[in-house]
Amino acid sequence: MSLADYEVVIGLEVHCQLATRTKMFSACPQRIGAPPNTMVDAYTLGMPGTLPVPNAEAVRYGIALALALGCEVQGTSQFVRKHYFYPDLPKGYQITQSDRPYAWGGGIEIPAGRIRLHHIHFEEDAGKNVHVPGEDVSLVDYNRAGAPLLEIVGEPDLRSASDAADYLRELRAIVRTLGISEANMEQGTLRCDANVSLRRRGVETLGTRCEIKNLNSFRFLERAIEAETRRQADLLDAGEAIVMATMSFDPDRGVTKIMRTKEDAADYRYMPEPDLPLLVLPDGWVASLREAQPELPAARRLRYADLGLSANSAALLVDDPELAAYFDATVRSGAEPKTVANWVGGELLAKLEGAPICDSPLAPEQLAELIGMIADGTVSGRAAKQVFSTVWAEGGSPRAIAERDGHRQVSDTSVLEAAVVEVIASSPKQLAQFRSGKVSLKGYFVGQVMKKTRGQANPKLVGEILDRQLAATSEALPE
Ligand code: ADP
Ligand code: MG
């Protein structure tokens, strides 16, 4: 059989590390990129006698996401212990949620349709084992141990690798818009496991799934799903059964490999967390967070489409809420939206060279002023780019800089009128050709006027004056 005879079924489990000041169950500060083992306290290290206290900020962030995804937030949920033995887990168990998560249901809209969510739950992260290359030792960094995580568990509604990437991208945009996490895959603040199974087309029942762990880029997510699809199809074609397993993806060879055959839930000795009562949400939290919900990506995309932005421009802004805020502020300052989107997506991003928009020395008001100067003919588009660079380097008002550096466009009609008349008078050969039908020579006349005015003439006005003058000379002279 060929791949086309199978339907691929995918469900994602996504972990999102919350950008709270402190960890999930202790007042230990957390910071991404801190030197190893500097973000730890007695609780993080599993010292006897320490007790967990849930982080209210993390709970609020979790509720905000659940509301944005249309989940049913539970007034009461339960923490449980999940036991396993590994050096990155000092306590010997992880506090998570299982049968009674804080949010059920919900969904994410992607171009292919609505992908349902199963639930979202809170948990604490483990530390990180660092294998020293070429040496026979492993080190452990506990900075991440106890970091607050949301696990967003999707239903197996996805039907292709690219749909899976769409789903994860939309989730990322929503998380970033809420400002609850950097949601950065390279950094590990957004992590994804993909469950993949195949079934013959037309068959209702789901096939046996395998779970690919730790996909840390969109590219790897798609490639891993494609590789796992091929592996399972080959096995099925050969008449073999799929064994439920946990897989890893080898990006160099482009294949998935079995890490371990799936452990049973019973192996984890799940039990209610004895050191924590049920999590009961205080009155009013859900309502006030619902009230405070920002404009979500779907609504933002619609608003940008109404402003005339291309889908690409809108996507660029929706994926980076701070850039979107900058765009909105520039438009509020009076600049035309499509032009703003072009400047933000072009000149501004190029100058930022990957730095965040908060590093821009140009405030939205300054960009709006610059764009206004193009619109009212004060400067040409080309001169505006020079003014932009100067303001970027030196600061100041774009209008003042354009004035000082002689970038003002000549829009004085009497000056332009004179230049046009002069150019026509000194180009009798071109004028004759123009009159005999070679209308493309208008470009030549425009060029001459621009040269005469050292590039500062307003080209639109020059065009208009030329049309008038050329018509006048044709009428004045007999054919
Ligand atoms: P677990 O066994 O990890 O507790 P579930 O069985 O509920 O969890 O499923 C975990 C993830 O696997 C979910 O994202 C779900 O959508 C996905 N999943 C479940 N069954 C299948 C399947 N047959 N094919 C693909 N994905 C599946
Ligand atoms: Mg799982």
Image: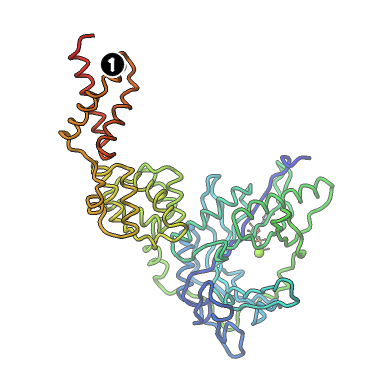
Q: In the image, what residue type sits under mark 1?
A: Ala
Q: Is residue 186 left or right of residue 359?
A: right
Q: Is residue 267 above or below residue 418?
A: below
In percent of width and height, residue 351 lies at: 41, 55
Comparing 251 with 404, the one in front is 404
Outermost residue to the top:
479
Comparing 36 with 69, the one in front is 36
Q: Secondary structure at mark 1?
A: helix
Ligand 1's image quarter is bottom right
**Which residue position holds label 1?**
432
Placement of the N terminus among the 4 image quadrants: top right
Quarter of image, res 153:
bottom right
In percent of width and height, residue 385 lies at: 34, 48
Whether residue 120 is visible, yes or no, is no
Q: Is residue 468 above or below residue 180?
A: above
Outermost residue to the right:
239
Q: Label 1 crowding class (10 Å Cα cut-off): few <14, some 14-19, many 20+?
A: few
User: Ligand 1 within 8 A of label 1's CB?
Assistant: no
Whether residue 269 is visible, yes or no, is yes
Quarter of image, res 445:
top left
Q: Is residue 405 left or right of residue 230?
A: left
Q: Residue at x 31, y 53 (%)?
A: 367
Placement of the C terminus among the 4 image quadrants: top left
Q: Is residue 338 left or right of residue 131?
A: left
